[in-house]
Amino acid sequence: MGEMVLFGMLGALTFGLKFCMAALPNIEPVSLLVMLFASVFGWRALYPVYVYVAMEILWFGLGTWNINYLYIWAILALAAILLRKMEQPLGWALLSGVFGLCFGALCAIVDVFIGGISYAVTKWLSGIPFDIAHCVGNFIIALVMWKPMSALLDKLYGRVKRK
């Protein structure tokens, strides 16, 4: 029961933090949190991730972007699970930055099915400035926040497991 509550709260926290930072274009804490969840919880990280996705859908409504969120965050979680032994914040910052840079290209996969290859490529190319901002924001947030957030999550999760 404690783990279920923790995952629900972490998903809600992810949504709330992103919502609070919405004024900054493509600068968000979601990538950092997905990596943290995956490094601590392994595949169970998908529980708080999809709580977050469900909250996004409930708040903003249905759209084609919902399809992107169903697989994009799982890709980042998989990468973080594979790298979960990495201890250096710089490595996590690089992963987060590369993910931010690739975000538009990952979204373009769905766009191919919506409007064809030329539509997807055009939309992706027009979004590159946002992907660059996403890359830089992700890199800085992960570099600065990885250690304190990782320590906090380890402490929280240790408390939940003991109960």
Image (cartoon, rainbow, N blue to C red):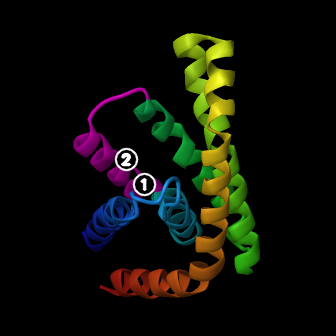
Report if the CB atoms under discs 2 and 1 are less than 8 Å apart. yes
* Dominant secondary structure of the residues highlighted in magenta in the image: helix
Q: Which secondary structure lies at badge 1?
A: helix
Looking at the figure, which quarter contains the C terminus? bottom left
Q: Residue 53 carries which label?
A: 2
Q: Is residue 53 magenta?
A: yes
Amino acid type shown at disc 1: Val
Given residues 49 and 102, the one toward you in this image is 102
Q: In this rendering, would 81 be left or right of 66?
A: right
Residue 41 at x, y percent in the picture: 50, 67
Q: In this rendering, would 121 be left or right of 38?
A: right
Tell me if residue 75 comes above or below residue 160 in the rendering: above
Residue 106 at x, y percent in the picture: 63, 36
| Residue closest to the far top | 116
Q: In which quarter of the image is residue 2?
A: bottom left
* Residue shown at the point (65%, 61%) measured from the top left: 80
Q: For the magenta stretch, what is the residue range? A: 46-64
Q: Residue 49 carries which label?
A: 1
Q: Quadrant of residue 20?
A: bottom left
Q: Which secondary structure lies at badge 2?
A: helix
- Total marks drawn? 2
The Cα atoms of the two marked residues, 2 and 1, are separated by: 6 Å
Mark 1, residues whose alpha carbon is within 10 Å: few (<14), some, or many (≥20)?
A: many
Mark 2, residues whose alpha carbon is within 10 Å: few (<14), some, or many (≥20)?
A: many
Q: Does the magenta stretch include residue 140?
A: no
* Residue shown at the point (74%, 65%) measured from the top left: 94
Q: Residue 100 carries which label?
A: none
Residue 125 at x, y percent in the picture: 69, 31
Amino acid type shown at disc 2: Val
Mark yes or no: residue 82 visible: no
Mark yes or no: residue 111 visible: yes
Looking at the figure, which quarter contains the N terminus? bottom left
